[in-house]
Amino acid sequence: MKKQTVICGALLCDGTGTAPYTADLFLVDDRIVKIGSGSHAGFEEIHAEGLLVCPGFVDVHAHSDLSLLAAPDAFGKISQGITTEISGNCGLSPFPVTDRNREKLAHTWKSYGIDITWTDFSGYAHRLEKASPAVNTALLCGHNSLRSAVLGYGDEPVTETALTEMKDLLRTMIGQGALGLSTGLLYVPGKFAKTDELQELMSVLKETGSLYATHLRNEGDTLLEALDEAISLALHGSGKLQVSHLKTALQRNWHKIDALFEMIDRAKAAGVQVSADRYPYTCGQTNLSVILPPPYDRMPDARITETLKNDDAACAALERDLEREDRWDQIILSSTDGLAGLTVSDAAEKMGVTPARLVVELVRKDSAGTLAAFGGMSEENMRRIIARNDVFCGTDETARPRDFSIGRSHPRGFGAFPEFLKRNLENGLPPEQVIRRMTGAPAEKFGLKDRGVLRVDAFADLVLIDLKKLCARSSFADPHAPADGIEKVFVNGVLSYADGRVIAHNGRLL
């Protein structure tokens, strides 16, 4: 028997940029069948007077590849109105898996209690569908995963044979359903890739029409050069470029914001389909190990821990090198029991050691599992970035449960979308423009057919919002606090989040 629902009396914001209007929204099974007035006979009524109804939010920059297997409720995401996540970002995807990268990946995934039972996109997709997540998922193929599957994690130059193998693997992953290629050129082993290696991979994107998403090689001192590389690569590929978590890192680079915007605008004028994403916070989050000096900056996290574990002399030398670091009051520990939410400076004082000593001990114990939030971003630049018409919202986070059973989130993991919407509305932007960048525009950019819009025959991914109550409550002190004002969420026509609870798992692999 068909499931028939009508959402009554809401103000609809349809994801296309059209001004909001009042109408009833009729759903049959997983699709929208009518927008307007009509008989409600046979339809379950959901009264939404005083609420804004829009398409479910599309998180273009997620890292939920593993967490959805371990905690398919995806509470942090669905509770902020997200119905579709795009994972596999920053060069990190759960495929391809070979003997060259299996051990390292297994070490990373162990913290989620996940065993590797697949080698490619199709195998992972089968595992994900068995997990039955609450939200929809699409994935990119990560360059770090691709490169390590062929070459491992070393810095040796890529050979013609290896490049051919990487291209064949990428072609296969896209053929099985990956939306494109992502790079994380700050991380091992992606940081070892020269531009010509990436240009070769762009040829696969050109032949398949697939998108290139990139965590730039640098987001601070050589930001403009890194963006120039990304634009050049997109021109060698499909011409579709997504710049991940656009920012000007470190105060000495804040002035580059105008030049950054000018480069993007010139590229668009030249025909490159450039868009970006950003979370509405001035702290990012990644592994604490990114601050380590050579030779640790060229090691995967597992090797950092292995190197330091039984070598006191190496630890002492690293500690001396880290004494030169002056940002300890801008780095917040995210995943360390008893210290999470504290700056490195405050945590070190609590432990009675120097900041440098604390960092050495943390990465010595578990570099892969030690996350930190890094400050150094401009509030004004962030405001300007999220106001741009070509910037989408992205959490840059894992979908986590309400508890801390699979780690502690950055506040963006529970509040990015409400905060993005609220900040832009407070800054005078019309709701239809902001919501388009959270729904229809990213769905179109990533090729998600019939998603991100309210129209007849589109999938019924919906979020019902009380704008008067809308507030992201998550903070570094309480990062898993759910947002206020997200009243109900539908995923593929099924009411999946209401009254602060996940009540259905109806997500799909897209």
Image (cartoon, helix red, strand yellow):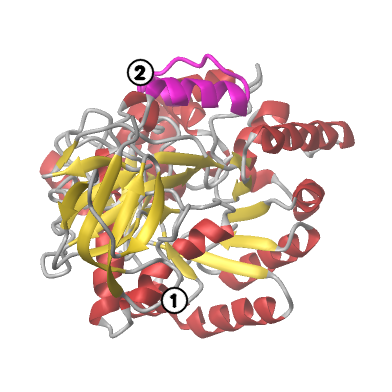
Q: Nearer the viewer, residue 3 or 134?
A: 3
Q: Dots 1 and 2: beta carbons under 8 Å?
A: no
| Residue at mark 1 to residue at mark 2: CA–CA distance | 42 Å
Is residue 128 visible to us here? yes
Which residue carries the number 2 mark? 113
Q: Nearer the viewer, residue 44 or 170?
A: 44
Estimate the x, y position of residue 100 in percent, counting from the top left.
66, 21
Q: Nearer the viewer, residue 32 or 195?
A: 32
Q: Residue 338 falls in which quadrant of the image? A: top left
Q: Is residue 487 magenta?
A: no
Q: Tell me, for residue 275, which label it has, or none.
A: none
The crowding category of the residue bearing disc 1, from other C-alpha atoms within 10 Å (few below 14, some 14 to 19, many at least 20), is few
What residue is at 43 percent from the left and 46 percent from the top? 85
The crowding category of the residue bearing disc 2, from other C-alpha atoms within 10 Å (few below 14, some 14 to 19, many at least 20), is few
321 on left or right of 463: right
Quadrant of the image containing the N terminus: top left
Q: Is residue 109 magenta?
A: yes
What residue is at 48 percent from the left and 52 percent from the top? 457
Q: Nearer the viewer, mark 1 or mark 2?
A: 2
| Kind of residue at badge 1 | Arg
Q: Nearer the viewer, residue 206 or 432?
A: 432
Estimate the x, y position of residue 325 in percent, counting from the top left.
37, 57
The stretch of residues the image draws in magenta is 108-131
What residue is at 54 percent from the left and 80 percent from the top? 261
Helix, strand or loop at mark 2: loop
Estimate the x, y position of residue 354 in percent, counting from the top left.
23, 46
Which residue carries the number 1 mark? 252
